[in-house]
Image (cartoon, rainbow, N blue to C red):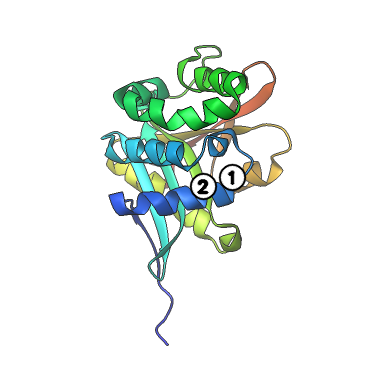
Amino acid sequence: MPAAVRSCTPAKQGDVQRVVDIHVAAFPDFFLTSLGPMFLRTMYRAFLVNKGSVFIVARFNHDIQGFAVGVLKTSSKDRALALRHLPQFLVSVIPGLIRNPLKVSRRIASQFFDVGDQIKIPDDAAVLRSIGILPDARGTGIASDLLREFERFSLIKGARSVALTTDALDNDRAITFYRKNGYEIAQEFMQGESRQMLLMLKDLDKNFS
């Protein structure tokens, strides 16, 4: 039998549906997942065509097992990304609005338009928006491979650091993962009225010199 081959490469248009499937499997209880596959397809297609994006997928014997996506800070405003693809986002969010109009409208406003707490992201950073792998792929090292390639491609695009946000409470596994991969807590902040978050940073110049 041929040896198993694992690689991390930039995402392509044909990868979007598989990324959506992985997102749903990896984050079944997350808000964005609740908006449905149409919204997720629109969101990941928007990232794919955005020149400031870094979008990596991990393949194992040609099957995508995970992904990492983010943007350079200079193009990282979710609001700007949403406005550039406003017709598609408006159509894709309708099912979620029908199911729960108040909750969805509030969360969308917070996600794309809130200017509350200002987190201190360096101007030269790439911002990791999401990293997800299939549940069966946990513990295989794919997540670390994805993160490493996201950092490498971010450096190629001109970033000198990577920033990410993650929950501060009941999130030891993710925080430990990022710490093991060289990330440090730079700031604690509140998202909305009750969600305590962490900003974590990694200096790429120190790790890729």
Where in the figure is residue 209, as x and y percent of width and height?
Answer: 36, 46
Residue at (41%, 62%) from the top-left corner? 59
Where in the figure is residue 124, as x and y percent of width and height?
Answer: 36, 28
Residue type highlighted by circle 1 = Phe
Q: Find residue 159 and report its image quarter.
A: top left
Judging by the rendered image, the residue that carries numbered circle 2 is: 23
Residue at (61%, 29%) from the top-left corner? 198
Q: Residues within 10 Å of mark 2 (few under 14, many from 20)?
A: many
Where in the figure is residue 111, as x and y percent of width and height?
Answer: 51, 23
Q: Residue furthest top?
A: 116
Kind of element beneath mark 1: loop
Q: Residues within 10 Å of mark 1 (few under 14, many from 20)?
A: some
Residue type highlighted by circle 2 = His
Residue at (51%, 17%) from the top-left corner? 109
Question: Looking at the image, can residue 92 be seen?
Answer: yes
Kind of element beneath mark 2: helix
Where in the figure is residue 80, as x and y percent of width and height?
Answer: 35, 21
| 124 and 58: which is toward the camera | 58
**Is the C-beta separation of discs 2 and 1 under 8 Å?**
yes
| 180 and 19: which is toward the camera | 19
Judging by the rendered image, the residue that carries numbered circle 1 is: 27
Q: Quadrant of the N terminus?
A: bottom left
